[in-house]
Amino acid sequence: MAIESVNPLNGKRIKKYPVLKPGQVSRKVKAAQDAFLNWKETGFPERSALFKKAASVLEKKKDALARLMALEMGKPLAQGASEIDKCAWVCKYYSEEARGFLLPEKIATDASKSYVAFEPLGVVLAIMPWNFPFWQVFRFAAPSLMAGNTGLLKHASNVPGCALAIEDIFKEAGFPPGVFQSLLIDSGQAAAVMEDERVKAVTLTGSTQAGKSVASKAGSLLKKTVLELGGSDPYLILEDADLEKAAEICVNGRLVNSGQSCIAAKRFIVVKAVEKRFLELFRNRMMDKKMGDPLQEDTDIGPQAREDLRDQLHEQVLESIVKGARCLLGGKKPEGKGAFYPATILTNVKKGMPAYDEELFGPVAAVITAKDEDDAIKKANDSSFGLGAAVFTKDKKRGEQLAAHRLEAGSCFVNGIVHSDPRLPFGGIKESGYGRELGGFGIREFVNIKTVYVT
């Protein structure tokens, strides 16, 4: 059995990798556990120095890593380079801030001394997706390893080259053997790794269905999990929005990573009074984006990561049209090689259509008409997902009120693209998962929050 890396631009196999045998997997888990016993005793200064070195390695290899992403999953080069920059940032951030997040917290009680300590759990298994093949891993690894845990990565099967490249980055940075390892295994083997008593926690970024499966398995084993799952982020365009600015931001928010992002803008809920003008601006800007070879510097939209995913997206579009949606732009599957799908706008989207009810994982925008602010909020929250949301209005206080108190999501932005930031917690509610990554909250997900009480 093997794992194949296939170029979505032309369908050609890049490389074939052997799947690890059970004995090999067990030895890697043992190496992670053995490494943990030493790694947890290292001081923050030593861990910090290693992550600063990892950041330097990432920066040095940025162009090569961006090219690897373009070849394996179709990410345009400029976006790949930005992803590597963000990985270096998160390494630097936690190298500087981790110690402060995990300092013991004194609590005044009847004891002579009482405080809360934060201790690492042990081996953490990370099951990660292909869409941000470096960022998803580093945003887990930087806080988790800085906290004293060791990491095992089960990456998506279509980015094995990225998985091995990440392991090489840690090695080149000088991390001790076993502190971070990539496992080229299938989903069945991943379940077996979860069951291993040496593995103490699991983090997954992926589909809602995958999250439910991992949560069920981990729950039966009473193991800690953090799940960042699907999303169908609503962007609300209110009647007083700066429409030029909103259209530009909405296009970029929809087309990031060729539309393949959990946190991407997917539903555009537009107050009827400004819908006509917004759609003109939105359509024109979508038309300006170039689809093509991700290795070309001027490409905005690369191929979708796999042909089956592109075909699934197209079926969602066609079914929505059959049910009454109107195609304002795109909507046709290109002929010829490559898993391409054009920038597409669907209007007249209503409940009961895939474009309303489901996550559209590709460059397809679902435009939903709202009567007014209250109707827009109602439709925004009428979703099983709750990862991110944005609202566009010239009245920032109004926008803040809606973001802080009325929109149901883990991250709510005013007049901007929803995105993750190492300094802020990131995660969702409802079927978008639970737990948080990044910031101070993220590093405390995989520690034992221990009460120490001295009489």
Image: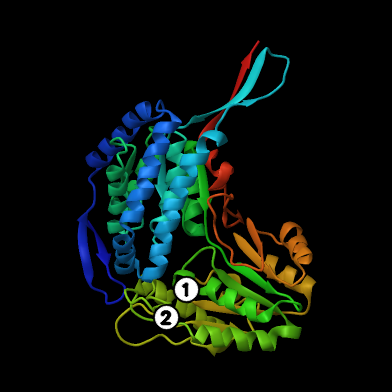
The location of residue 131, given as percent across then percent down, is 42, 63
Query: Which residue is labeled 2 in the image?
Result: 341
Q: Amino acid at mark 2?
A: Tyr
- How many other residues sit within 10 Å of disc 2, few (<14), some (14-19) or many (≥20)? many
User: Relative to the observer, which residue lies in front, 401 or 13?
Assistant: 401
Please tell me whether residue 159 is drawn above or below residue 364 in the rendered image: above
Identify the colour scheme used. rainbow
User: Position of 58 compared to 342: left or right?
Assistant: left
Query: Which residue is labeled 1 in the image?
Result: 362
- How many other residues sit within 10 Å of disc 1, few (<14), some (14-19) or many (≥20)? many
User: Position of 195 compared to 415: left or right?
Assistant: left
Residue at x 74%, y 61% (from the top left corner): 400
Q: Is residue 131 visible?
A: no
- Picture quadrant of residue 16: bottom left
The location of residue 31, given as percent across then percent down, is 29, 34
Residue at x 42%, y 45% (from the top left corner): 141
Q: Amino acid at mark 1?
A: Gly
